Image: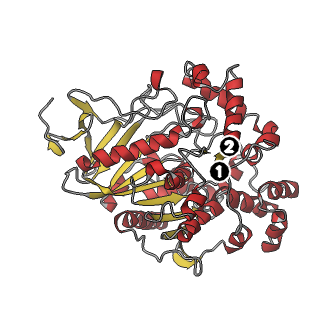
Amino acid sequence: MTGIAAGSVFAGPAPEVRVAGGALRGSREGGLAVFRGVPYAEPPVGGFRFAAPRPPQDWEGVRPAVSYGPPPPQTDMLAPDSPAQGATGDDWLTVNVWSPDPDPAARLPVMVWIHGGGYVFGKSSSPEYDGGHLARDGQVVVVTFNYRLGAEGFAEIAGAPSNRGLLDQVAVLEWVRDNIVAFGGDADEVTVFGESAGGGSVAALLAMPRASGLFRRAVAQSVPGTYFSRTLAADVAVACADEMGLRPTVADLAGVEPALLVVAGDMVAASMAERAGRWGQAAHRSILFAPVVDGDVLPTTPWEAVASGSSRGVGLLAGHTRDEQRLFTAVTGLLGEVTPEQAAEALRIFAPGPDGAGRYRDAYPQAGPDQLYELVHSDWLFRMPTLHLAEAQVAGGGHAHVYELAWAAPGLGGVFGACHGLDVPLVFGNLTSGQPAALIGERPTPEAEALSAGMRTAWTRFATHGDPGWPAYDLDRRLTHVFDSPSAVTTYPEDRSRSIWRDCSFPPLPLIGA
């Protein structure tokens, strides 16, 4: 050992800290101490394959923490450049930390980010998740991490715990509880935040007994309403294993190369349309994996748990973008091309209740096929689940703040509107790398910069004080902060959709005919 005292010091040009496993040496970047690729659990391979995460082994000496850890095995069907870049190896379960002041006495608020990607792709090393702007401008400690995805994290495998990806997230929060003081963070002031599948993970954590007490506040951005019943998840696992002539058991799958398991899932995903008769809405939206309501790790859906008071003591900030579906419509080549028949089919499949399609047409009498198609998809997958989470929090005796991002992205002629994912670069302040550059433009306008600064301020203010800067949501006034240029606080702006979905409970997606 190098004689580093417990806690944190600066030794030479690089910051050094001591955590439970040993000493770490990071880097200085833009006035911050940055540590990357720090293990929070043993690599989930070999005898730990498909197991709940286990604490990492201690190490000798000072461990370099300057490079991101490798991403977990994942599909590249939806993000072709996602898994190939960066480090490789089995040490998937790592965290990254940005700290303005790595002194145990600093006691700064902590923000723990859960990335999205449909529970099947994503990595903490993506440039849009760099925590530098957020940590520096908000004077908070930012933590990002990798968690198991796809079959590794969410397949229902006999002999393995359900929801291993969620258990990884709990392990990160336990690591934060036990170690973040060394980075200048306050373990009693932790905010977990995430978008899309990350927002769905945040919602799940609110419902999980294992996560109770590990965070004080939560930000749920664009929460998907997709949680699987155990019967549906088991049937999906059977289909994936069958592609390799195997059964969905630890005994059969533990020796399969992770990359081959990904390929098997891709093959099933490519034939989802043929499985709509069994998998229903999940197949229609090509959703192969999601958190499983298994009665143990995730006892009930987030809406049921939160409405019963499971997160009464947790502050909640929840919101969505106005045009959630627009990005997916563009990617599938349907932008401006939706036929009346396609709109009618979308309403039939996704609108709630026996007369959901008629209620949409009555509520939006001027809407053509394109708008109806986008409305029902946006509402079913993201907008109404997010709103209902906030309303469940209020009904359960807790506090919630609600927002909508309505600012239209100027990139590519503005065709994407306020699409799904637009909030991520704005919240992180990373406006010129990767997908954000396409949405916002290579040279962000002063308007974009100002909106990003406003969202960062709201998020870090919420993490610090529990108040993002506008009134809490209640079931009468329904006050909502609309981020736009200019921004404003108003009654929830999607009230027609809210009325249509008022009585929907978002149960686990079923296996049809089971």
Is 60 left, or right, of 216 in this rendering?
left
Sequence-wise, the earlier of marks 2 and 1 is 1
Picture coordinates of residue 43, whole percent (x, y): 42, 28
| Residue 208 can be seen, yes or no | yes
The CA distance from mark 2 to mark 1 is 8 Å
Q: Residues within 10 Å of mark 2 (few under 14, many from 20)?
A: some
Give the structural element (helix, strand or loop) at label 2. Answer: loop
Numbered mark located on residue 315 in the image: none
| Quarter of image, res 454 | bottom left
Is 279 left, or right, of 457 in this rendering?
right
Give the structural element (helix, strand or loop) at label 1. Answer: loop
Residue at screen point 75% across, 48% down: 281
| Residue 405 can be seen, yes or no | no
Q: Amino acid at mark 2?
A: Ile
- Assess whether mark 1 and mark 2 are in contact (beta carbons under 8 angstroms): yes
Tell me the residue that label 2 is attached to.
287
Question: Nearest the camera: 298 or 193?
Answer: 298
Tell me the residue that label 1 is attached to.
226
Q: Residue furthest right?
A: 341
